[in-house]
Amino acid sequence: MSAQIGRSKLKTILKNSTAAGLAAVMLAGAFPLAAAPAYAEPVKVEAAQVPSFADVVEAVSPAVVSVRVQSNVEQTSDQSNFSFGFGGQGFEDLPDDHPLKRFFKEFGGPDGEQFGQRGPDRMPHGRGDGKGRLRPTSQGSGFFISEDGYIVTNNHVVDDGAAFTVVMNDGKELDAKLVGKDSRTDLALLKVENPKQKFTYVDFAEDENMRVGDWVVAVGNPFGLGGTVTAGIISARGRDIGSGPYDDYIQIDAAVNRGNSGGPDFNLAGEVVGINTAIFSPSGGNVGIAFAIPASVAKDVIAKLKDGGTVERGWLGVQIQPVTQDIADSLGLSEASGALVVAPQEGSPGGKAGIKQGDVVTAVNGEPVKDPRDLAKRIAAFKPGTTVDVSLWREGKATSVKVELGELPSEQAMAGPESQNGDTPQAPATEQALAGMGLSVTPAEDGKGLTIVDVDPDSDAADKGMKAGEKITSVNNQAVVSAADVLKVLEQAKKDGRTKALFQIESENGSRFVALPIVQG
């Protein structure tokens, strides 16, 4: 009896358990167990192992410093003359507890500087008291490259400085002296004299092995906040930002701001691949576009500064411009490469060696020249006094000259000739219109070339930037003083099978070459 009861209870339990289980399945899956649909296996991707930068930062941070600069400034700063609209009241005249004064003292002051350009990273203090005493004027970042205290930073951080202080990552402050600086690459070398201490230092990387997309870690002192780390990738290489003839920057997207100037960018091995020097920032803050001096450039310049405090560069002494495809066609070149000589400077090594206006420099010592920037870098790499073989394309033929390079003047002005008159010349009646090219010209008053009287706005000449008031001094490297001269040169170019002609244009901004299509017929 008891056994049967036990079996009955067991059946009841099993029945209830089954019903409960089925209900649970239906509630969880919204389908009866027997009707559950079959699903494919879910996609599984092995997670990428994103590296942590902590080990790199921990290792390199002791080598990165803040650089503070003081100058002997006799005049009051721009800040003290800044008007806030309070009856001409200046920044220094505001009460110490005024909110605007507190704000500008904390965040850098209304100094009128534009972000995205080279310039001193100004201290958040006024930089002059009118009494000629040393006052803080700028701050930036830097890093040790040797255990005996050599520090790399930017030239624009230390420029015009009279006293320099480096602040270690542990807060210790040390005096430093300026060993040398180079404005053309925006590099400077400082030295801390402390024979009792060996400093943690970092090495330069072989940056040519770095690729677009590789990680970089920027360490510096933005806004004077103290040591800060940001990370990003290399966005581009070989950037020309118009700061000089040796532009060859690495572009990165790590957050770089005021105060990061002179700070290093590291690869994941803790090596310096670049030195922060400029940012592009329409908004005034970081927008992910920063430019760094490549390690390969810095190594060479810093070695020269360490050796003698200055950088000697070879000097050719010719004004040059790029060779466009139009210019290549007009000169009979097979490809648009090399550097077109606009004019050799008077008394320059290139001029003395016979390099002429309209020549195209195609190679130096047999190494092809890609463009004007490439030529400038190649020539600068030689020591003054070195004789080099310069290959030229002249009047449809290849030739060469040997040039003994001079020494590039320390701060040679690269500006064009000063204009005599800022107004458009008033030309007499047009002698003849080169209507097919969209140009109306008349002989220049000085007898040298043709003055452009009018440019058809729908012409190729207008598209190439030619304007009324400019002068045509030569066509296909032949001097012209009348419209007839121009037409004669163009006819010869047609016979030679050329489809374009090279016009040399002079304006108040200097001389340049423009290639224009030759009207057939």
Image: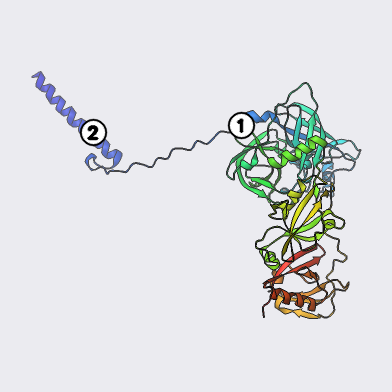
Q: Amino acid at mark 1?
A: Val
Q: Quadrant of the C terminus?
A: bottom right
Taking depth in this image into account, of 130 and 383 the one nearest to the observer is 383
Regarding residue 191, the answer to whether it shows in the image is: yes
Q: Which of the pair 205/359 is nearer the observer?
A: 359
Q: Which residue in the protein does label 2 denote?
A: 20
Relative depth, front residue between 106 and 493: 493
Snapshot colouring: rainbow
Look at the numbered disc 2 and give the secondary structure of its residue.
Answer: helix
Earlier-in-chain disc, 1 versus 2? 2
Residue that badge 1 annotates: 56
The kind of residue tagged 2 is Ala
Q: Position of residue 382 (x, y in %)?
A: 77, 46
Question: Where is 148 relative to 301, above or below?
Answer: above
Of badges 1 and 2, the one in the foreground is 1
Does residue 57 sit above or below 2 in this rendering?
below
For image coordinates 85% across by 66% down, the residue present is: 422
Viewed as shown, does residue 65 lie left or right of 426? Answer: left
Q: Mark 1 packing: few (<14 Cα in 10 Å), some, or many (20+)?
A: some
Relative to 445, is 248 above or below? above
Q: Percent x, y for residue 480?
A: 81, 73
Q: Position of residue 235 (x, y in %)?
A: 61, 47
For residue 231, side relative to residue 156 (left or right): left
Residue 167: image x %, image y %? 75, 30
Quadrant occupied by the N terminus: top left
**Alpha carbon of mark 1 to alpha carbon of mark 2: how far?**
58 Å
